Amino acid sequence: MAKKDLKALVTAFDNSIQEEDEGYDVRVRLTFIADVLGTASNDKEVYSSYIASNAPDAPSKEEEIAAIGVDESIEKGTTVFPRDKDGNPFLWDYQVRGFFKAACQSLNRCEGQAFAKATKSLKAYRKVLDQCVIVAPRKIPFNLSGEMDICQRPLRAETMQGPRVALASSETVPAGSTVEFTVRLLNETWVTALMEWLNYGQYCGFLQWRSSGAGSFVYEILDEDGTVLGGNKETSKWARMWKGETLEAPIDPEPKKKRGRPSKKAS
């Protein structure tokens, strides 16, 4: 068998990749219906020695440490959002994939439910999310709807010495803020599963204190021009109920007829 020319093989592969476009891109916009709480330590020394030590490589570690930093008026014990060079808060791409994993884990417990069918059929979802679902850009900026604030709340824990209470403090992005990003799926059959994960975000969202509803959101799927193709932003009854809106009861078009024989009129 004659040895094929290397250049021809490389060109053939490049052409096949361009034809298939290397995956299926889904552009997403999230609108938060509750405040989002920051998770990064504001103490760079703590972040360097503990959190960022888990970064996959040195450049990534330096990048994450450099992104931490807010006004000096915020105490070191407060968890914050990373900032870009202009001081704007953002999400990391891996935090979106972390949410997808949490959504998969929860939806896998919903046996027989239509809203979790595609997720239930996804085998080894952690490997799929780690290796075959890519989020871009790496830094996903918030489009703020108002001023950022601080949320302080008690943390209770049962210990060997009895119950203990500590005060937690976190920087917050206000409800109504949005983020936009693109999800590349290396298999287009996972699009329905992706929408199931995003739909779950109205119940349990991003980052800290999710059990209180913090970080929950509604979503929209966009085309290349930003036109809305679908999502639950306008249709989510739960989001409206959660915000305290009163839903109108459906109107019965015709009164129900009474069963049985009609009563005889008195003569």
Image (tube, rainbow, N blue to C red):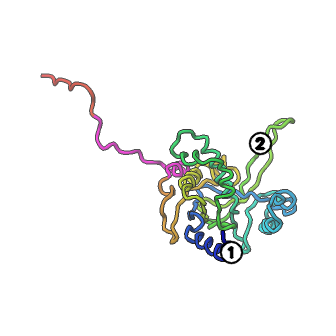
105 or 167: nearer the eye? 105
Q: Is residue 103 above or below residue 230?
A: above
Left or right: residue 178 compared with residue 43: left
Q: Which dot marks residue 6? A: 1
Specify the amino acid type for callout 1: Leu
Toward the front, the furthest residue is: 1
Query: Residue, x 81% and y 68% (percent of image)?
Result: 59
Q: Is residue 169 visible?
A: yes
Element type at mark 2: strand
Toward the left, the furthest residue is: 267
Q: Which is nearer the N-term, disc 2 or disc 1?
A: 1
Which quadrant would the C terminus be assigned to in this image?
top left
Query: Residue, x 60% and y 48% (percent of image)?
Result: 122
Q: Residues within 10 Å of mark 2 (few under 14, many from 20)?
A: few
Specify the amino acid type for callout 2: Arg
Q: Is residue 70 above or below residue 214?
A: below
68 or 119: nearer the eye? 119
Q: Position of residue 124 (x, y in %)?
A: 66, 48
From the image, tell me which residue sits under label 2.
Answer: 156
Q: Main secondary structure of the magenta part?
A: loop
Q: Is residue 156 above or below residue 128?
A: above
Q: Position of residue 258 (x, y in %)?
A: 27, 30
Q: Residues within 10 Å of mark 1 (few under 14, many from 20)?
A: few
Instruction: Tell us which disc is closer to us: 2 or 1.
Output: 1
State yes or no: residue 75 in magenta.
Answer: no
Give the magenta part as a residue range: 236-256
